[in-house]
């Protein structure tokens, strides 16, 4: 297979993913469903348009690595702490009970024990991507059912680590006494991998990421993050572990780093392309003719998955003393198969724990449950409102409703002298705020002052979303460069059209550009400086200042300090 034939296949795969992804998005579905259907359409069991399917699948494995890396970046220790014991208990019980129920049913159907355990692990996951997307669109992430569902999903993301270690042990030893020995060896190798990556992530990588050369050259930042991610993937393979285990651990270890938000934003676009290839390659494994011939089996499995997962998840949430309405909504929100299920299924396929028919059955059922997921989430609230007490609480106090992110806050972009003044004023009046700054040294200094700060480029949608822009009260842009300010403002407006944005304009000629970008309030430094200079001049000359629009210096400091403050930024 020559290079140009491979490139043509990649273009065809991504083109089909783009077309169907856009179509499904317009229909209110997750683009992931479009990617899967694109694979079905152009795959060997569809139009058979690809000549290098094996090579495309090899490239798609990079998408899995980057997916697990970015999921790991979403799991900092403080976020896990915010789950509380109740959140961890809900997630753990949901996983265990779903897996046990699946193993029991599969055992009754005559499925070998190793395969039954694999199926149990596969069905334990729901789609983080789909649930987050739908809840965000409905503004329900911070509702009680939303928080419960997100908490369970976060625990599922963590559990993928031991599951990926268990799969090869099941394949190699069966369920006899040797399985404990193989599991011990596998977990020892996993511990060695984690220890090595921990040293790199906490000692070497921060030094490199903080260096002036990397800060000034964004491409070096991206390359360094990719080297760490893909290097961890190779290290896991070298130790005989699942390759994607390495990328996931690498992300988790960097999640508490001040660089996490920016790394996630920088590689987001690259990940999207490879991830689309991954889901296209999964869709290529589906066989529509086989599904039609086994429609009763596929339909029965889908019904069992949706009803079974809804009942288990709702039962767990109710067991933890949440209201019945919350339990119903959370149960139906999680009643589908997630993207991590494909990862575990791929591992089982590679280790020959699952045969071709079983894999076709899983792929067909997974695709259809993902298509149903947005509708199930919408129906869930209607079902909950059928109960006598129909009000579903948006939030409640206590550990169960502990927020996983700051809300009703002000986001300050830039922590130079101007940003520090804004932060000081907000702190004085008791208003919560979060600072975003692209300079790691500035971010580190702000943390030392007790400021809640994230290192990241606010012009990136991922960084703004991670700063909880959807729940913010306002955005204050203090960066001096007008082009950067305009990009930040327009990106924020795409996410939150109703958001109040206050911006700084250095020169009058940039005023229109920033206002057109979406800023409601714009402070023009030239005008402000002119007013200050006029006021100071008249005061020094002992003249009345009538007719001059005076602006008192912030904090009652000397007027000359204001000019110095602006120039220093």
Image (cartoon, helix red, strand yellow):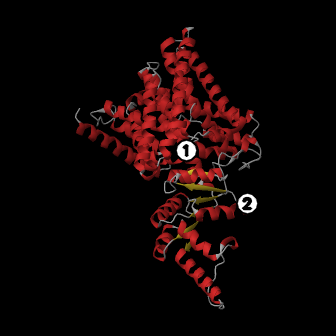
The residue drawn where x is 56% and y is 78% is 529
Q: Where is residue 307 in the image (x, y as percent from the top left)?
A: 61, 32
In the rendered image, which quarter contains the C terminus? bottom right
* Count of numbered circles in the view: 2
Towards the viewer: 196 or 300 = 196
Q: Mark 2 points at which residue?
A: 430
The residue drawn where x is 64% and y is 52% is 452
Q: Position of residue 465 (x, y in %)?
A: 56, 52
Corner quadrant of residue 270: top left
Q: Where is residue 111 in the image (x, y as percent from the top left)?
A: 53, 16
Q: Which mark is residue 374?
A: 1
Callout 1: SS: helix
Corner quadrant of residue 332: top right
Q: Is residue 164 left or right of residue 411?
A: left
Q: Which of marks 1 and 2 is nearer the N terminus?
A: 1
Corner quadrant of residue 401: top right
Neighbor class of circle 1 (other Cα within 10 Å; few <14, some 14-19, many 20+) is many
Vertical arrangement, residue 417 with respect to residue 92, above or below: below
* Residue 500 appears in the picture as rendered: no
Neighbor class of circle 2 (other Cα within 10 Å; few <14, some 14-19, many 20+) is few
Towards the viewer: 64 or 145 = 64
């Amino acid at each position: 297979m020559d290079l140009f034939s491979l490139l043509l296949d990649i273009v065809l795969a991504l083109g089909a993913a783009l077309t169907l992804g856009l179509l499904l998005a317009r229909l209110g579905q997750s683009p992931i469903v479009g990617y899967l259907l694109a694979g079905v359409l152009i795959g060997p069991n569809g139009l058979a348009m690809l000549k290098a399917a094996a090579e495309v699948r090899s490239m798609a494995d990079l998408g899995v690595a980057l997916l697990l890396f970015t999921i790991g970046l979403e799991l900092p220790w403080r976020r896990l702490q915010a789950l509380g014991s109740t959140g961890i208990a809900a997630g753990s019980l949901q996983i265990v009970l779903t897996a046990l129920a699946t193993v029991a049913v599969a055992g009754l159907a005559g499925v070998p024990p190793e395969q039954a355990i694999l199926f149990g692990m596969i069905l334990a996951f729901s789609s983080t991507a789909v649930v987050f997307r739908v809840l965000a669109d409905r503004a329900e992430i911070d509702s009680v059912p939303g928080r419960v569902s997100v908490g369970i999903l976060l625990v599922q993301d963590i559990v993928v680590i031991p599951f990926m270690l268990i799969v090869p042990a099941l394949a190699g030893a069966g369920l006899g006494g040797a399985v404990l020995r193989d599991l011990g060896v596998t977990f020892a190798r996993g511990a060695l991998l984690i220890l090595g990556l921990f040293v790199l992530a906490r000692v070497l990588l921060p030094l490199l990421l903080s260096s002036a050369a990397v800060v000034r050259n964004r491409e070096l930042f991206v390359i360094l993050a990719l080297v760490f991610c893909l290097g961890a993937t190779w290290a896991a393979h070298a130790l005989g572990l699942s390759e994607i285990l390495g990328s996931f651990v690498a992300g988790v270890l960097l999640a508490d780093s001040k660089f996490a938000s920016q790394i996630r934003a920088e590689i987001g676009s690259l990940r999207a392309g490879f991830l689309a290839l991954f889901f296209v390659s999964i869709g290529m494994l589906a066989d529509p003719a086989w599904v039609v011939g086994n429609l009763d089996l596929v339909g029965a499995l889908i019904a069992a998955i949706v009803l079974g997962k809804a009942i288990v998840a709702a039962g767990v949430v109710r067991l933890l003393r949440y209201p019945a309405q919350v339990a119903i909504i959370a149960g139906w929100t999680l009643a589908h198969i997630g993207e991590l299920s494909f990862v575990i299924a791929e591992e089982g396929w590679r280790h020959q724990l699952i045969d071709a028919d079983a894999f076709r059955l899983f792929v067909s059922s997974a695709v259809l449950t993902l298509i149903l997921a947005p509708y199930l989430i919408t129906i869930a609230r209607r079902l909950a409102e059928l109960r006598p007490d129909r009000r579903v609480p948006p939030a409640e106090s206590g550990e169960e409703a502990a927020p996983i992110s700051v809300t009703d806050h002000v986001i300050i972009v830039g922590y130079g002298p101007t940003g520090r003044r804004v932060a000081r004023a907000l702190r004085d009046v008791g208003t919560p705020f979060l600072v975003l700054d692209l300079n790691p040294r500035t971010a580190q200094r702000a943390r030392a002052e007790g400021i809640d700060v994230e290192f990241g480029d606010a012009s990136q949608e991922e960084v703004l979303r991670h700063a909880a822009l959807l729940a913010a009260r306002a955005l204050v842009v203090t960066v001096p460069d007008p082009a950067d300010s305009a990009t930040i403002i327009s990106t924020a407006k795409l996410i939150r059209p109703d958001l109040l944005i206050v911006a700084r304009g250095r020169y009058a000629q940039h005023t229109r550009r920033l206002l057109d970008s979406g800023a409601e309030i714009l402070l023009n430094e030239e005008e402000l400086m002119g007013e200050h200079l006029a006021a100071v001049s008249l005061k020094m000359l002992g003249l009345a200042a009538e007719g001059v629009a005076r602006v008192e210096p912030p904090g009652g400091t000397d007027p000359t300090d204001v000019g110095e403050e602006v120039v220093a930024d």
